[in-house]
Amino acid sequence: METCAGRPPHLGYETLQEWRLALRSPFPGFPPEALQFFRGLARNNKREWFLSRKPLFEERVKEPMRQLVDALNLALHDFALEYETAPDKAIFRIYRDIRFSKDKKPYKEQIAATFRRRGAPHHQGGYYFAISHKSVAVGGGVYLPEPALLLAIRQRIAERHEEFRRILAARPVRKLLGNLQGEQLSRVPRGFAADHPAADLLRFKYYILYKELPASLATSPALYKAIAERFRVMLPFMHFITESFATQPKKPDVRAMFA
């Protein structure tokens, strides 16, 4: 393996391959301190611990996250312009809402961002990624949609299930994202025939593609490409799901909406 021996030490790359990749990537990766921060937070998820390290969080975690979101927006501009989202709107707060939770830990042990379709409410889904000391997670779709929206998605799948299966079976999707994810009902929801050819797809409670990658990827220049190419591969899936919103169900079975 080629090494960076003889090259300026401030480059910070162990191999020439990593160095060359960094030159091609618009985002160099998170600094190692970012993952160290989340490891420490997982052991000390307390207000006092966080506040004493908040400057570190802002500089070594949140600011690089803003830079990554900016870089991904440039990628989205080429193939999914409607999903471009400003960093301040894309990045989730690290503070947990613990008002109704038995888990009283005040902070999330990851940093995440979502890119929503312009003008669409949050429950209509979008692209998503998260960085932690445990993994790099990348996904997209519609998570826990409202009943009427879920019914619209199911009706579109029922009518065009062969097209939906082709999208899910595409080689790039299977290679980079795997199978459709989501909790499922034990039987076909009311309003659809039990023997419907799309019965297995209609049982899903939400529709997402989601992949967890090694945490070590977070500090590599390869992180940007790993996320951007999965966003791109998801585009036909995202189009299929979101086009359901434009076609509201005709005379919906109210029972089916809450199945």
Image: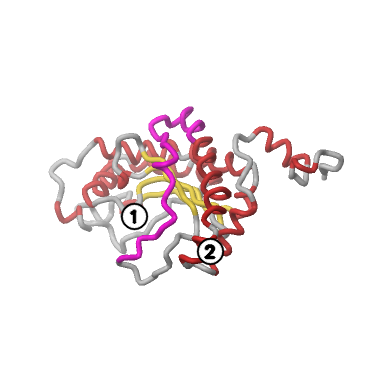
> Where in the figure is residue 103, as x and y percent of width and height?
39, 70
Mark earlier in primary sequence (2, 1): 2
Mark 2 to mark 1 CA distance (whole Å): 34 Å
Nearer the camera: disc 2 or disc 1:
2
97 magenta-colored: yes
Question: How many numbered marks have been drawn onto this rendered protein structure?
Answer: 2
Q: Which residue is mark 2?
A: 41
Q: Residue furthest right?
A: 6
Question: Are there few (<14), some (14-19), or many (20+) residues within 10 Å of tag 1?
Answer: many
Q: Residue furthest top?
A: 78
Q: Could you say which is closer to the camera, residue 74 or residue 49?
A: 49
Q: Which residue is mark 1?
A: 204
Is residue 2 something that shows in the picture?
Answer: no
Rendered-image quadrant of the C terminus: bottom left
Q: Are marks 2 and 1 in contact (CB under 8 Å)?
A: no
Range of magenta residues = 73-99
Q: Using the image, determine if residue 81 lies above or below residue 111.
A: above
Residue at 28 percent of width and 39 percent of height: 244
Q: Could you say which is closer to the camera, residue 225 or residue 150?
A: 225
Q: Quadrant of residue 80?
A: top left
Q: Using the image, determine if residue 222 lies above or below residue 54.
A: above
